[in-house]
Amino acid sequence: MTASQSRNPALAGKKKERKTMNTLTQFKKILILPLLIALSLVVAAPARATPSCGLTTVILALEHFPSGSLDLMCNEFQQYGWDLKTKVKGDSDVYIVQNTFPPGADTGWHTHPGPSLVTVTAGTITVYEADAPNCTPKIYNTGDSFTDLGCGDVHLLRNEGLVCAVTIAVQIIPAGQIRRTDADQPANCPTFTCPSPTPTPCPQ
């Protein structure tokens, strides 16, 4: 105890009380800190990736094209009203993929590193694009074709009909890269729950 504290017992008591309060405050902070960290993780955690449901995928072909081999130009506008310009820098992998969807099946939200040319060969496919206004879907029937730019565009294909649906896609991606990457649930799009049991696979 200092000389001033011995002369003023009240001062010594206040310092002791302050020290006790600081210890209790620190103890409370130690207890609360893990709870605050856990809550921040819950709030900051993004939606989980959405894998496919009931989808059967078959790689029909995979070819490698060296850089420069997909630099194509064909001007037949005067004869056919048709003009083609394709220029790819870097080696490419080109996939031909068949996807089969039993009723209720979907691809899950995903993206590709390059473009896809898709044709519906059976049934009806409903396509949801994450960047579409209100995530309004587009419907494609047997014989219809559509393109998917990939390159980070997030989308989901779903069979909302009563019969099996099939698509064939030609996909061009950077050589050696993963053909498909699962994506998180977009906030502006509907959430699809995979039925239990999983939809019965279609006849191959």
Image (cartoon, rainbow, N blue to C red):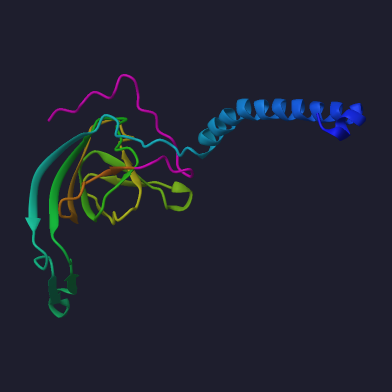
Instruction: Provide residue 69's location: percent of width, then percent of height.
Output: 8, 66
Q: For the N terminus, which image quadrant?
A: top right
Residue 160: x, y in percent? 34, 35
Classify the position of the C terminus by image quarter: top left
- Given residues 118 and 57, the one toward you in this image is 57
Residue 157 painted magenta: no
Q: Which residues are magenta?
A: 183-204
Residue at 14% from the left image edge and 27% from the top image edge: 203
Task: Reply above or below: 197 against 144.
Answer: above
* Percent coordinates x, y for residue 46 in the rendering: 45, 39
Residue 89: quarter of image: bottom left
| Residue located 33% across and 53% down the image | 152
The extreme bottom residue here reads 78
Q: Residue furthest front?
A: 3
Outermost residue on the top side: it is 197
Relative image position of residue 41 (x, y in whole percent): 51, 35
- Say which quarter of the image contains residue 107: top left
Nearest the eye: 163 or 29: 29
Residue at coordinates 48% horizontally, 45% vertically from top-left? 188
